[in-house]
């Protein structure tokens, strides 16, 4: 398994084999489309409905990335505040944990009642799911700063800004990125879950609403087409953050050394 | 002798930690300008506490501490830890830049001093390497380069060679003597190795644990530079024997 070629080929071949098996199974057993469409059928449906699906995809992507950006900002700011003022962490961490352990499906209906704008409500739901991994990881990263390096910065009379920029931020970066990789997937899940609860409400609708819509009409191939787009989005987010992690940490951090 | 030489002094200093542990009891010591003093003792005898007090990183519970770091001269004091304590995300060059950078020196302003120091410690070819790519000895060289780049007047070293193999350790020891002779800083060197203390220092203070205090003092009037011959001489062996005996007693 040393060869990079084989390392890439094996997962790709496995996926192709699964798809081919699926195709063959559906054709041989003559499974009707409304039960289980073949991959080729899903692809053609996707192609035929591309304009409308793409618009929905764009909406879901906006919610996902919007919530993720807000989760980054919120998670990092709250972690920094917790690290600076321990009393704040003592007071607020339980709230953050309660938010984290409450299933978002369960609070989404409430949020949709309280917040008039559907987009804002969806953003909030996805944010609630996504911010905690970033908060807890960044906090752990800030805590994990080498105590000897801290002493060195004290000895050389570093200003708080220098300490933040040259010591705390780089120390916490690998932890933050680990959080980001988790939150990237979670924000997509949060966005889709909230959309499912919201149903077809609002002027713009995302992929989840298209799935619901298609299921009411038993348009199974269309459900699968929307699902395929969701899977693709999740994969792209995952790969994007892998790339980012390698770019930022590749040269020095153990997590990226091979 | 350096006219602006710093005063480095502990006068009846005690340090009791919040846990109630008395780390250091009524300890007095003076380090002359340009002197190489070793603190020798088992772990937990307050050696590191003395260094931290001199660096202004810890505060005495009672007694009086005089050191350049306490007069607001941060860059006059440098500290080398047992671990190289390099920033893993920064190159060797950037690591050595750190103290100058914290003092407000930009890249180009600091470059001559950094480049000179890297050649001096033999790391010129590794300026762009990351710490993870270096051997233990090279990491320690980078750490020492970072300490010396500010031309400190007091260097504090906390068992800097303890984690290194024997060959690397003795070569770094010899190099340290050269750097010390050239830059003429005062050096307080913490070690638990009798041989290291005997070979390197002008004066050895033997410490005993619980509570930490100085129990024995030995002056070694061997001129610099010290050669391998010194290590093989009967005198060196006598010094080692005396230090070992007083360490034994101190336990």
Image (cartoon, rainbow, N blue to C red):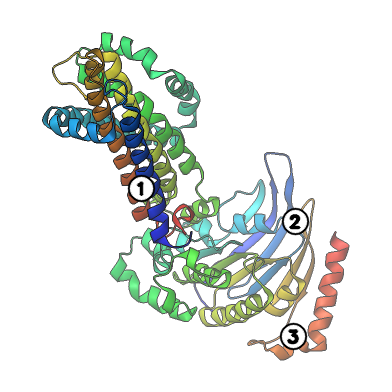
Which comes sooner in the sequence, label 2 or label 3? Answer: 2
Neighbor class of circle 3 (other Cα within 10 Å; few <14, some 14-19, many 20+) is: some
Q: Which mark is residue A161?
A: 1
Front residue of this view, candidates A145 and A222: A222
In this orientation, which residue lies closer to the viewer: A93 or B103? A93
Q: Secondary structure at mark 2?
A: loop
Which circle, 2 or 3, is nearer the viewer? 3
Question: Callout 2: 10 Å neighbours few (<14), some, many (20+)?
Answer: many
Chain letter of the residue beneath label 1 in the structure image? A
Estimate how packed mark 1 is, as few (under 14), some (14 to 19) or many (20 or more) residues with alpha carbons within 10 Å. few
Residue, x 65% and y 68% (percent of image)?
Answer: B189
Label 1: element kind: helix
Q: Which mark is residue B79?
A: none
- Same chain, labels 2 and 3: yes
Mark 2 to mark 3 CA distance (whole Å): 27 Å
In the displayed image of the protein, which residue is found farthest to the bottom? B229
Q: Which residue is under mark 3? A: B231
The residue sitting at 35% across, 47% down in the picture is A161
Residue to which mark 2 is pinned: B45
Instruction: Tell me if residue B7 comes above or below residue B195 in the rendering.
Output: above
Q: On the picture, is B74 further left or further right than B42?
A: left
Q: Quadrant of residue B99?
A: bottom left
Residue B47 at what x, y percent from top left?
69, 59
Can you say which quadrant of the picture contains the N terminus of chain B? Answer: bottom right
Residue B31 in the figure: left or right of residue A31: right
Do the CB atoms of the residues marked 2 and 3 lie less than 8 Å apart? no
Chain letter of the residue beneath label 3 in the structure image: B
Q: CA distance from mark 3 to mark 1?
A: 49 Å
Image quadrant for the C terminus of chain B?
Answer: bottom right
């Amino acid at each position: 398994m040393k060869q990079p070629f084989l390392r890439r080929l094996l997962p790709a071949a496995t996926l192709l084999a699964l798809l081919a098996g699926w195709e063959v199974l559906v054709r041989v057993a003559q499974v009707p489309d409304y039960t289980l469409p073949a991959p080729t059928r899903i692809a053609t449906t996707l192609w035929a409905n591309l304009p409308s699906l793409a618009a929905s995809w764009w909406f879901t992507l906006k919610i996902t990335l919007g919530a993720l950006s807000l989760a980054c900002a919120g998670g990092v700011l709250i972690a920094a505040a917790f690290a600076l003022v321990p009393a704040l962490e003592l007071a607020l961490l339980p709230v953050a944990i309660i938010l984290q352990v409450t299933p978002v499906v369960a609070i989404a209906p409430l949020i949709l009642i309280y917040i008039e704008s559907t987009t804002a409500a969806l953003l909030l739901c996805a944010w609630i799911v996504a911010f905690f991994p970033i908060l807890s990881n960044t906090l752990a990263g800030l805590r994990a700063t080498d105590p000897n390096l801290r002493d060195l910065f004290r000895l050389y009379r570093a200003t708080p800004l220098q300490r933040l920029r040259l010591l705390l931020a780089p120390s916490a970066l690998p932890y933050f990125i680990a959080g980001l990789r988790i939150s990237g997937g979670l924000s997509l899940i949060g966005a889709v879950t909230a959309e499912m609860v919201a149903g077809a409400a609002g002027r713009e609708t995302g992929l989840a609403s298209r799935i619901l819509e298609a299921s009411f009409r038993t348009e199974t191939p269309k459900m699968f087409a929307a699902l395929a787009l969701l899977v693709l989005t999740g994969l792209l987010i995952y790969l994007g953050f892998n790339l980012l992690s390698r770019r930022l940490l590749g040269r020095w951090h153990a997590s990226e050394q091979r | 002798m350096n006219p602006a030489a710093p005063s480095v002094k502990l006068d009846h200093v005690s340090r009791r930690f919040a846990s109630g542990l008395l780390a250091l009891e009524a300890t007095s010591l003076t380090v002359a300008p340009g002197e190489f003093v070793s603190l020798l003792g088992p772990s937990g005898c307050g050696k590191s506490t003395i260094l931290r007090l001199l660096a202004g990183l810890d505060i005495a519970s009672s007694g009086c501490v005089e050191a350049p770091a306490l007069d607001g001269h941060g860059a006059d004091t440098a500290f080398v830890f047992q671990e190289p304590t390099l920033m893993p995300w920064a190159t060797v060059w950037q690591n050595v830049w750190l103290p100058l950078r914290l003092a407000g020196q930009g890249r180009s302003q600091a470059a001559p001093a950094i480049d000179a120091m890297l050649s001096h410690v033999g790391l010129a070819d590794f300026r762009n390497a990351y710490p993870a790519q270096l051997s233990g000895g090279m990491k320690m060289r980078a750490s020492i380069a970072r300490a010396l780049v500010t031309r400190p007047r007091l260097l504090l070293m906390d068992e800097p060679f303890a984690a290194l193999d024997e060959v690397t350790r003795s070569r770094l020891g010899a190099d340290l003597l050269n750097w010390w002779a050239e830059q003429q800083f005062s050096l307080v060197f913490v070690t638990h190795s009798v041989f290291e203390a005997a070979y390197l220092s002008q004066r050895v203070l033997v410490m005993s644990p619980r509570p930490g205090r100085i129990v024995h003092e030995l002056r070694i009037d061997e001129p610099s530079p010290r050669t391998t011959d010194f290590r093989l001489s009967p005198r060196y062996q006598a010094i080692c024997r005396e230090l070992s005996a007083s360490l034994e007693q101190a336990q």
